[in-house]
Amino acid sequence: VLQLTLAVIKPDAVAHPLMLQALHQKILENDFAIIRCKDLVWRKQDSERFYAEHSGRFFYQRLVEFMSSGQMRAYILARDDAIRHWRELMGPTKVFRARYTSPSSIRGQFGLTDTRNTTHGSDSVESAQREIAFFFPDFCVEEWMQKE
Ligand code: CMP
């Protein structure tokens, strides 16, 4: 079934032009349609708001600092089963796990640390809705879904 997901290329990857290009290419090669794409920089409070569910975790401060440390690129991607396919392409969050279990995944190849892990992807239909609205407040998922 056709699905939308939010994908983000994080500051560690955007900082490297070749990596950004490689990841953009990977999206196209994996049959995603790019519905929206934008480059942006978060203020610290955007980062805190987006990751509020992690406040209190030991990595929260470093995550918040990192995600507001430079440019990011956000995409709305469409595909059958887009959420699962993008997460599979990314590989596991933790870099050691990504290296060993999914060495050809994005994080397996390019992840630097558990925080600087190159990309983000929504983990459910509900979070995709919330995250798309967060990054693209003018985009209406229902309206888009109704178009042929
Ligand atoms: P993301 O998919 O954006 O969702 C939450 C983020 O928190 C995650 O990617 C990582 O960047 C970060 N994160 C999750 N777990 C850890 C951890 N154990 N140590 C450091 N950072 C983490």
Image (cartoon, grey):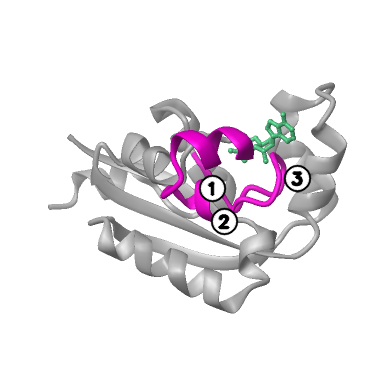
- Furthest residue toward front: 100
Can residue 14 be seen from the camera position used here? yes
Q: Secondary structure at mark 1?
A: helix
**Where does the image place residue 24, in percent across and percent down from the top left?**
42, 67
> What is the CA distance from the residue labelled 1 to the residue labelled 2?
5 Å
Residue in front for this viewpoint, 106 or 129? 106
Quadrant housing residue 57: top right
Q: Which residues are magenta?
A: 95-121
Q: In the displayed structure, does residue 51 sit left or right of residue 48?
A: left
Position above or below: 9 against 60: below
Residue located beneath label 1 in the image: 107
Residue at mark 3: C-beta within 8 A of ligand 1:
no
Q: Amino acid at mark 3?
A: Ser
- Furthest residue toward left: 148
Residue located beneath label 3 in the image: 47
First along the sequence among labels 3 and 2: 3
Residue located beneath label 2 in the image: 110
Residue shown at the point (74%, 57%) measured from the top left = 42
Q: Amino acid at mark 1?
A: Arg
**Where does the image place residue 11, in percent across and percent down from the top left?**
68, 61
Circle 1 residues within 10 Å: few <14, some 14–19, many ≥20: many
Task: Verify whether residue 93 appears in magenta.
Answer: no
Q: Are marks 1 and 2 in contact (CB under 8 Å)?
A: yes
Q: Secondary structure at mark 2?
A: helix
Circle 2 residues within 10 Å: few <14, some 14–19, many ≥20: many
Q: Amino acid at mark 2?
A: Phe
Residue at mark 2: C-beta within 8 A of ligand 1:
no
- Furthest residue toward bottom: 17
First along the sequence among labels 1 and 3: 3
